Image (cartoon, rainbow, N blue to C red):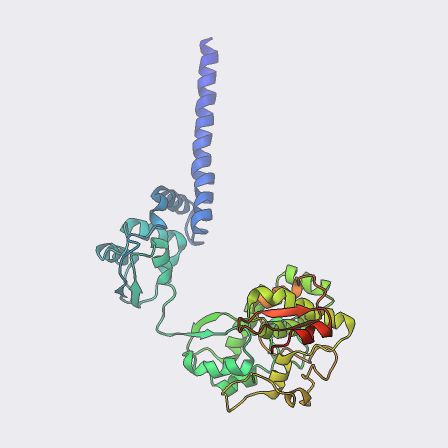
């Protein structure tokens, strides 16, 4: 009986130790990774276990602002200042609740190795995690280029002088005539028009035109998922053709929720062999309008519809030869997954809302004209 009891106790102790081992070696690191991202690659296994355990122990302290109503203030990080010093000064300034928690998160995530010196504007309304990442986003040597959905490449070029990049607009436009290797689905003779993925790009000021284009092209390639490509194929389009349709949809869809319906209209027309009759393609053909300082003439008149250009979809059946703007993800997704509709026409509503009336027949389209 005693031997049985001893055996039972030993089994219980062994199971308890196994449970503890799983908690430390398995559960806690996995939980920390789920909540705060993977640990820094350079950390040893014991260090990963140690910092994962600490982060879990802090509970909500890492993600809860110290003072949701706190005012923003300046905070200076000196070159080569240690994370320990920064953590203590943040706590002294009442920006964070726990200096040790900030330090542990920085080391666990590896952000302690990439802190940028300089002046920041921080608020106790930010969490410890938010402030930790804020120190990675600032660099006096960085520039920020914003590409908006629906811009054509000349509009991107025009924004370069205010971005902080040292790239001349003409050098950018010249470099954009060459197809980046990562966009191998583009025709060999095509430019990058249509594939400048709309986003915010933070880069060193001395970035070259070729480096910038490579970053932008890779960003497009990363967002070109297998689901998107399968959706394009389901519509009978390759990636380049889909980008052309999406570039038109992007310019037409003032209200993003209408993009799948507008995409359906153009796809329905293509399947039936109708002309697209897309105003944005005329605007693209007309180019820069000095009187309005715009690349997109609006409104168009009847003479504009007679413009001789392969981009004039009022005269030519099928797609224009290339994209006419740079579509965002919403427009690309709308082409891959259009709404199923019977529509072949649409025109803007008369209330200035940016929404459209859709119709099946040309007679209905005429009836939707504004008085």
In percent of width and height, residue 79 lies at: 29, 67
Report if residue 184 is visible in the image. Answer: no
Report if residue 104 is visible in the image. Answer: yes
In percent of width and height, residue 207 lies at: 46, 77
Residue 185 placement, left or right of 253: right
Residue placed farthest to the top in the image?
Answer: 1
Point 69% across, 61% down: residue: 340
- Residue 229: image quadrant is bottom right
Residue 102 placement, left or right of 266: left
Residue placed farthest to the right in the image?
Answer: 272
- Residue 248: image quadrant is bottom right
Residue 118 placement, left or right of 332: left
In the figure, 70 relative to 216: above or below?
A: above
Residue 181 placement, left or right of 273: left
In the figure, 335 relative to 37: above or below?
A: below
In percent of width and height, residue 75 lies at: 26, 64
In the rendered view of the protein, which quadrant contains the C terminus? bottom right
């Amino acid at each position: 009986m005693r031997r049985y009891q001893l055996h039972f106790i030993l089994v219980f102790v062994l199971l308890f130790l196994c449970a503890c081992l799983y908690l430390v070696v398995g559960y806690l690191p996995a939980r920390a990774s789920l909540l705060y991202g993977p640990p820094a690659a350079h950390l040893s296994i014991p260090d990963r276990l140690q910092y994962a355990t600490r982060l879990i122990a802090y509970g909500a302290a890492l993600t809860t602002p110290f003072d949701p109503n706190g005012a923003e203030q300046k905070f200076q990080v000196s070159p080569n200042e240690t994370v320990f010093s920064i953590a203590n000064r943040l706590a002294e300034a009442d920006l964070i609740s726990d200096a040790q928690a900030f330090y542990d998160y920085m080391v666990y995530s590896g952000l302690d190795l990439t802190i940028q010196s300089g002046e920041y504007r921080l608020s106790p309304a930010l969490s410890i995690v938010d402030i930790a990442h804020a120190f990675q986003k600032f660099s006096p040597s960085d520039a920020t280029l914003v590409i908006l959905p629906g811009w054509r490449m000349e509009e991107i070029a025009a924004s370069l002088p205010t971005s902080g990049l040292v790239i001349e607009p003409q050098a950018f436009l010249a470099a954009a005539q060459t197809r980046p290797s990562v966009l191998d689905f583009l025709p060999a003779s095509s430019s990058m028009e249509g594939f400048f993925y709309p986003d915010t790009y933070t880069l060193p000021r001395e970035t070259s035109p070729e480096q910038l284009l490579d970053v932008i092209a890779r960003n497009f390639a990363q967002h070109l998922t297998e689901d998107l490509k399968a959706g394009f194929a389901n519509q009978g389009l390759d990636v380049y053709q889909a980008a052309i349709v999406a570039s038109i949809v992007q310019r037409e869809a003032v209200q993003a929720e209408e993009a799948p319906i507008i995409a359906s209209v153009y796809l329905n027309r293509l399947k039936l062999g109708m002309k697209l009759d897309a105003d944005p393609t005329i605007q693209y053909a007309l180019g820069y309008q000095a009187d309005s300082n715009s690349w997109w003439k609006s409104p168009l008149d009847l003479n504009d519809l007679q413009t001789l250009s392969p981009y004039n979809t009022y005269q030519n059946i099928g797609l224009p030869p290339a994209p006419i703007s740079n579509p965002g993800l919403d427009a690309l997704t709308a082409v891959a997954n259009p709404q199923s509709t019977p529509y072949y026409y649409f025109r803007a509503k008369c209330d200035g809302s940016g929404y459209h009336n859709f119709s099946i027949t040309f007679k209905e389209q005429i009836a939707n004209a504004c008085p």
